[in-house]
Structure formats: C-alpha cells, structure tokens
Amino acid sequence: TSTYVPYKVKDIALAEWGRKEIKLAEAEMPGLMALRAEFGPSKPLTGARVAGCLHMTIQTAVLIETLVELGADVTWSSCNIFSTQDHAAAAIAAAGIPVYAWKGMNEEEFNWCIEQTLFFGEDRQPLNMILDDGGDLTNMVFDVYPELIEGIKGLSEETTTGVHRLYDRMKNGTLHLPSINVNDSVTKSKFDNKYGCRESLVDAIRRATDLMLAGKVAVVAGYGDVGKGSAESLRGAGCRVLVTEIDPICALQAAMDGYEVVPMDEAVSRAQLFVTATGNVRIIKDRHFKAMRDKAIVCNIGHFDNEIDMAWLNENYGHTKSQIKPQVDMYEVEGKEIIVLAEGRLVNLGCAMGHPSFVMSCSFSNQTLAQLELWANSEKYENKVYVLPKKLDEKVAALHLAHVGARLEPLEQEQADYIGVTLDGPFKSEMYRY
Ligand code: NAI
C-alpha cells in the first residue's frame, strides 16, 4: 500500500470554474438528481468505498458527487490519458474527494493514478467496490492486487470494450466478482453510444481541425451503436459517408439507412476523413495509410487506440511526426500528409468535451443503480456478468422524459392485458431489441 496522496490534478485553481460547470451539468442530469432525491436521505452506500476509473469529466463529477451523496467514499482516476477535464478534476479535489487525473498524462502516470485509488485515506483502507470503464482498474485489481478481491463486493462496467473483457474472463474462469454490465442497459448503449457520439464526434473533429465538413467524403468503420451515431453525426454536417462492416446485419442496416457500404481498401482512396468505431484492432493499418489521400484526417472513437495501427505508424513514420497543436499531429507517409487526432485515442474525449450531460445522465443513472444493487445484494450474485433488470432500465428512461417535455400515453388495463404486460411495466419482453 502506497503512502497517502490526497489528490493529484493539473491545477487546483481551476476548481471554481469546474464547480460552475458542474452546477450547469446538474441541471441537465435529471436522472442523477432524482436518484439523489430518492436515496440521499437514507444513504444506502454508507460503508462503500468505491474506486472509479472513468473519464474525469464534468459529467463524471456529477456521478461522483451522487455516489458521495448516497453515502459512499469515492476515489477516482480517468480511464484515458487525454480524457480528463482539468477543471472538473480540480473541483472534485477541492470538494475533498481523492482524484488522480489530468489531461495529457503518460502511461506510467496513468497506472500510478489507478493505483492511488485502491486504498482510501490516511489509514489506507482498501476499496470494496469497483466502477470501471474499459476494464483497466478491474485488470489491475485481478492481475496485480488479487489479495484485494476478497474484500470487494462487485464491479460495474461502463463500456462495450470493458464488457467484452468481462465476458472473456467469465469464459476463462478468471472473473472473480459479481459484475454488472452497464453498457447493455438499453438506456446506456442505445443512447450514450449512439446519440452521444452523434453530438460529440463532429464536435471533436471541428475543434481539432476547423475543417469544412460539408461535401467531404468520410468513412466510418463499424456500424454498431457508436458507428450509427458517428455516421449520423457526419451526415448531419453534410459529409457523404461510407461505412465498413464485417457483420451482414449491420452492413444491411447501414445500407438501408442510406450509406454506401464498402470495404476499407476501397474507401481508403476516396475518403478524406476516417473514423474507427469498431472496438476491434488494426482497422486502419499500413496499406491503408499508404493509400490515403493527402491531408487525410484519421481518428478513432472506440475505446482503445489500437483500432488505428499507431504502433506501425510511429515505428515507420514517427520521425516525420509534427504537432500542429495538442492532440493534433501530422505525419508524412509516402509523400502525403496525414493528420491523426488524439494520437488515435478516443477522439470525442481527447479533442472535445465528450458527450453532453443529458445523455451521460442516462448512463450514470445505470451506473448508480448498479452500484446500489451490488452493494446491497452482492451475495445474491455469482461471479458472472449481469445486466440490470428491464424495470430499472425503464425507470432510467422515465426519469429523463420530463426534461425533454415528453409525456407518456397512459396504458389502459384492457390494452395491457391485450399485449400481455402489467400497467407499470416492464413493457417489452427480454427479446425486444429497440
Ligand atoms: P458494437 O459492438 O455495437 O459495434 C462495433 C461494430 O464494429 C460491430 O457492428 C462490428 O460488427 C463492427 N466491426 C468489428 N470489426 C470490424 C472491422 N474489422 N471492420 C468494420 N467493422 C467491424 O460496439 P459499440 O457499442 O458501437 O462500441 C464500439 C467501441 O466504442 C467500443 O470500443 C466501445 O467501448 C467504444 N465506445 C466509445 C464511446 C465514446 O464516447 N467514444 C462511447 C461508447 C462506446
């Protein structure tokens, strides 16, 4: 156990600005605020020591303070070296919550930050809950600090890539804790991944490049939830969008949504803008870089930077790299200039401010409900991956309706009987895909 460092952020003087933005975000996060109103008085997370590893943004600050209001002790790190919003981290540190995160850290610092979150306070009490995004904290606990597992009640995981890792572990017999897959709540992946990226992808490209997007040809690799939002984001800006897919169902969806579906080898010479959204590896690699047009812009909105073969690019063309501004670099490949955003890491958090608060309120309401459930009822679960019950998913959605002026049709008993549901839900079977 390391010695206690109360917090480490870029500049604590940014706290006042961060606090003002947190206040604004709270007004856009009705789900989290409703959970505070419901559970704040009874403090059901009393005794919980939640270590969180999730992009340290303004929205995440509202999540952290919700967990605290529900009674938890919380420590925090960011799950990406570029995704911290330094004013958000400063405000959290100033509120007395141990946070270890700043924008533009290196890999070594990244691991150091996660490590700081494992032990709480001067007396170095170990964590007893994990809240993760991408699985780096989970991996550190399972692989480096296995002695801590016994004291932990469970973990909740935010994103597709982290959830993949959990299912792999379940298969291999190396999943050591009850785990809630937050990503596959409908009110998470069908909202954050899709509508979130629809807002934040183009925002990131514009902040990074100031490029006129209308009229450009862009390619989106992957037409899952993130790809769907990303393609729509670019189309909304006036791009002609090509989509690449390996899955015939998603390929057909893309075609029916009006996109041209082509292999990357064909797209590569036509597109000016490349966005990877697969959660898979080496989607853009050597031969693609070599075939690109001059001034092509390459970025990734999936969780890890290996979607773009940055290792190859840096090994072979690293000597040509020149920084235009932080998180915007130019390489020269075969006489052509290629612009890479956020060093291939997720561009919406590296080059912009991530998703807007409202959609993150949906995601983080699921996170909060997952933490509540695991803390209260951990012994009811095996070391497997679970999703939250549909009723809670519907509750999260319901908490967000009024804010956008949406009012439900009251379901009548006769109608409920006819479609085989009860008046207060769930309103769909488990098979329904939305
Ligand atoms: P998904 O599984 O819904 O979609 C991925 C799609 O990529 C699938 O349709 C799959 O068939 C396709 N694909 C796989 N290999 C491919 C290849 N070689 N070429 C073309 N397509 C290929 O996953 P989802 O939820 O869309 O997430 C994608 C990534 O984005 C994950 O890493 C996830 O963690 C991350 N993510 C990032 C967010 C952000 O704010 N930047 C928000 C949410 C998720």
Image (spheres, helix red, strand yellow):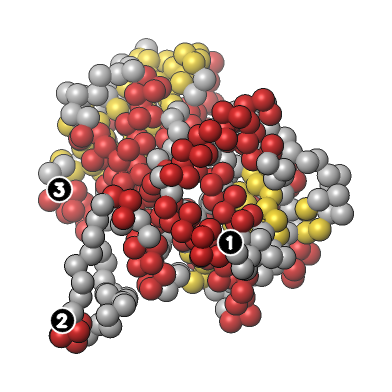
Callout in the foreground (3, 2): 2
The residue to which callout 2 is attached is 415
| Label 2 packing within 10 angstroms: few (<14), some (14-19), many (20+) | few
Callout in the foreground (3, 1): 1
Q: Earlier in the sequence, mark 1 or mark 2?
A: 1
The residue to which callout 1 is attached is 40
Q: Quadrant of the C terminus?
A: bottom left
47 w.r.t. 136: above or below: below
Q: Secondary structure at mark 1?
A: loop
Q: Secondary structure at mark 3?
A: loop
Check whether the beta carbons of the residues at disc 1 and disc 2 lie within 8 A of each other.
no
Give residue 203's quadrant in the image: top left
The residue drawn where x is 35% and y is 35% is 201
Q: Earlier in the sequence, mark 3 or mark 1?
A: 1
Q: Position of 420 compared to 148: left or right?
A: left
The residue drawn where x is 63% and y is 65% is 43
Q: Position of 201 compared to 432: left or right?
A: right
Q: Secondary structure at mark 2?
A: helix
User: What's the residue type where badge 1 is placed?
Assistant: Gly
- Check residue 343 in the rendering and tell me which mark sits there, or answer none: none
Q: Is mark 3 within 8 Å of ligand 1?
A: no
User: What's the residue type where badge 3 is placed?
Assistant: Asp
Q: Compute the Cα span from label 1 to label 2.
A: 36 Å
Q: Compute the Cα span from label 3 to label 2.
A: 32 Å
- Check residue 257 in the rendering and tell me which mark sits there, or answer none: 3
User: What's the residue type where badge 2 is placed?
Assistant: Gln
381 w.r.t. 193: above or below: below
Residue 222's x, y, as percent? 31, 46
Check whether the beta carbons of the residues at disc 3 and disc 2 lie within 8 A of each other.
no
140 w.r.t. 17: above or below: below
